[in-house]
Image (cartoon, grey):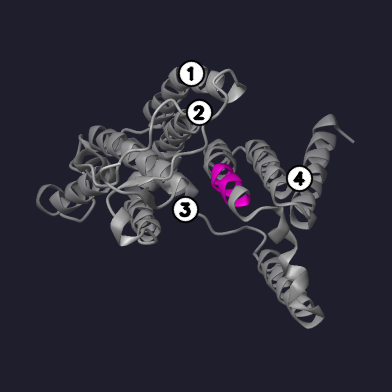
Amino acid sequence: MSATFLLDASLATLTLAVAAYAIFAREAFTAVVAFISYGLLLALVWVRLSAVDVALTEAAIGSGVTGVLLIGAAGRIGDGDASAPASLGPFATILCGILCAGASAGVAAAVLSLPPAAPTLATLAVQELPATGLGNPVTGVLLAYRAIDTLLEAVVLVLALIGVWSFARDAHWGGRPKSPSAPDPDGALVFLGRLLPPLGIIVGVHLVWTGANEPGGAFQGGTILAATWILVMLAGLCDAPSAGRPWLRFALVGGPALFLAIGVAGFAIAGAFLAYPEGYAKPLILLIEAALTLSIAVALGLLALGAPARRPQQ
């Protein structure tokens, strides 16, 4: 039994244990902390599977931004609602258990029914990668081979934010989200809010720039920038922006709009939607990634803040 096998087995066991703890935890905040820990362990699992891009996304979005959202939700509902499912009654509890078991059995059956050698286009994708000028096959897939999916993912973020904003009262439309509670000016949160932003900006920009050839990209870099922005606002070092600001809305839709414009231009310059002219694929992809990074950072940051809760003039 090798040390690598022991490491993987221990990591898998710990991941399953933390996942179970997050499910069965009775206090909301405890469950959220367990969920964040589970996301970080899952990122290590993806690293062991040599999927570093997925690991970065899991750590940044699955644990980082999602963790902030869940902590905010736990703070609003309190621990009293964490045991709400018990009030559904035994019949509803048993029904939920049956449905969850059925869903798990369906996923297990689908995985076990896969052929021994799964069909893949990975070899063909790697062979055609030099035509894009990229060195990272994941970026090639996301921005060249299935660029329309990536475009739709960016649009979905904007639509999700519009959905969150729709919960605002009419008098608050275009205003600012609720300010976080003022932290202790000498506390750790304020200290981190002053210390980490320069590092967060450098790491976020680096992930975007290196994503053309190494693991990284717009979603990973944008999430790091969003987390840095959220930390600064939670520390009370800057106020949340007004949702009616033109620059904010331009930053929000600028990335998807530029992506769409380049895609439409592909009809005239490359003969197809979202096609890149020969020799210009890499510069255009880097331009799209840079614009998407800003839009993703703004969208995720505003999603974490929630709907406007203050009048525009406040």
**Residue annotated with mark 1:** 194
* Of pointers 4 and 3, the one earlier in the residue sequence: 4
The relative height of residue 123 versus residue 148 in the rendered view (above or below) is above
Q: CA distance from mark 2 to mark 4?
A: 31 Å
The relative height of residue 311 versus residue 285 in the rendered view (above or below) is below
Q: Quadrant of residue 267?
A: bottom left
- Residue 260 in picture, x, y percent from top left: 22, 51
**Residue annotated with mark 2:** 235
**Residue annotated with mark 4:** 15
Which one is nearer the viewer's eye here, 121 or 112?
A: 112
Work out whether residue 101 can be spotted.
Answer: no
- Residue 102 in picture, x, y percent from top left: 72, 75
Q: Secondary structure at mark 2?
A: loop
Give the number of the disc on residue 294: none
Q: Are marks 2 and 1 in contact (CB under 8 Å)?
A: yes
Q: Secondary structure at mark 4?
A: helix
Q: Quadrant of residue 255?
A: top left
Q: CA distance from mark 2 to mark 1?
A: 9 Å
**Residue annotated with mark 3:** 121
Q: CA distance from mark 1 to mark 4?
A: 33 Å
> Could you tell me the amino acid type at mark 3?
Leu
Q: Point out the stretch of residues depicted in magenta.
A: 66-74
